[in-house]
């Protein structure tokens, strides 16, 4: 299933599933289950699939505004330096543990929505990633339990404002500019991704390929990341984990390549779709 959140034609936030041909959406929102985050915590996979099968897929994609698949995750956790080639280009040692930092929900936009070059910087860098969306969740999960805790996967543009990231040893400012990243268009449920290590993560800037690598080359696997994160925080339905970006980021190119107003960033992950984000200057 491809599950998405969106603003419906009547102006209300909704969530639903894409039709088999990908041309239309259903609306699964109810008074008791108004959003996808609540649905992941309220319905098991069988119930979710039953509701999708019974739903009317009568909303045209042209009539909606895409939201991030989970508009307000309880937690957004990101892993840095998790591809060997990226650690190499950054001339950094391999991390002894997953390098985890947090993002705020308002830093991320949905498919087709603009990301902002901030007024105070010209160093907005692209970062394509695979995102993991938690379903069942839990605490102190073992690696062999990690797959059962995952609801699905999505394309993620983590992006960074590099000068602010490097003001100190704490990366939080550079990773949390308003509307600097995005994810979507939808999440693809785990049953449709039989081999997550076979996925490739790609970024394109104005149609030019900038990054490409296989999830198989993660330094810390998805199972290792989920288990590690669950050691220090309980994972809940709808929580989001971004798994790291491949080599080829703009700040480490010679000369550097940063995004500017008028650019278009695309993040594609094999079988998950393509996230498209236009770039604009931060509005006044």
Image: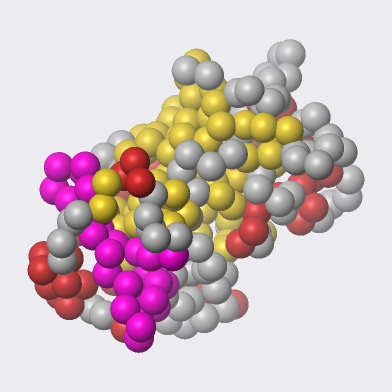
Asked if the stretch drawn in magenta spans residue 27, the answer is yes
How many numbered discs?
0
- The reply, left or right, for residue 139 in relation to residue 200 is right
Highlighted range, magenta: 12-41
| 143 inside magenta stretch | no
- The quadrant in which residue 282 appears is top right
Q: Is residue 244 visible?
A: no
* Residue 277 drawn above or below residue 104: above
Say which residue appears at 18% left-offset and 56% top-offset. 57
Left or right of residue 265, residue 46 in this image: left
Above or below, 116 against 208 in this view is: below
User: Where is 217 relative to 243, above or below?
Assistant: above
Q: Is residue 116 left or right of residue 138?
A: right
The x and y percentages for residue 89 are 64, 28
Question: Which residue is drawn at the image coordinates 67% and 32% (left, top)?
Answer: 280
Foreground residue, 250 or 98?
A: 250
The residue at the far front in this view is: 10
Estimate the x, y position of residue 217 in percent, counting from the top left. Answer: 42, 39
Residue 113: image x %, image y %? 53, 42
Residue drawn where x is 35% and y is 46% of the image: 63
Q: Horizontal placement of 204 versus 177: left or right?
A: left
The quarter of the image holding the C terminus is: top right
Residue at (54% x, 68% y) in the render: 72
Q: Quadrant of the N terminus?
A: bottom left
From the viewer's side, name the closer residue of 21 and 258: 21
Q: Position of residue 165 (x, y in %)?
A: 79, 45
Q: Nearer the viewer, residue 174 or 178?
A: 178
> Can residue 57 be seen from the camera position used here?
yes
What colouring style does the render use? Answer: secondary structure
């Amino acid at each position: 299933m491809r599950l998405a959140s969106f603003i419906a034609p009547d102006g209300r936030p909704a969530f639903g599933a894409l039709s088999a041909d990908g041309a239309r959406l259903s609306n699964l929102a109810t008074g008791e289950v108004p959003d996808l985050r609540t649905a992941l915590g309220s319905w098991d996979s069988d119930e979710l699939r039953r509701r999708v099968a019974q739903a009317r897929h009568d909303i045209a994609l042209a009539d909606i505004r895409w939201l991030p698949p989970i508009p307000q995750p309880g937690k957004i956790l990101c892993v840095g330096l998790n591809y060997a080639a990226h650690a190499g280009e950054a001339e950094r040692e391999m991390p002894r543990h997953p390098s985890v930092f947090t993002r705020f929900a308002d830093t991320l936009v949905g498919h087709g929505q603009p990301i902002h070059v901030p007024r105070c910087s010209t160093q907005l860098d692209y970062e394509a990633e695979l995102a993991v969306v938690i379903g069942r969740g839990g605490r102190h999960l073992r690696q062999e339990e990690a797959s059962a805790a995952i609801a699905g996967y999505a394309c993620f543009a983590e992006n960074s404002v590099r000068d602010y990231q490097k003001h100190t040893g704490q990366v939080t400012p550079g990773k949390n500019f308003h509307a600097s990243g995005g994810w979507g268009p939808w999440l693809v449920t785990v049953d449709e991704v039989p081999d997550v290590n076979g996925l490739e993560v790609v970024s394109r800037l104005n149609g030019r390929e900038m990054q490409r690598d296989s999830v198989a080359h993660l330094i810390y696997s998805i199972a290792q990341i989920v288990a590690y994160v669950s050691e220090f925080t309980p994972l809940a339905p709808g929580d989001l984990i971004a798994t790291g970006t491949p080599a080829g980021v703009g700040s480490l190119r010679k000369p550097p390549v940063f995004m500017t107003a008028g650019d278009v960033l695309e993040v594609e992950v094999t079988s998950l779709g393509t996230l498209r984000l236009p770039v604009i200057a931060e509005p006044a």
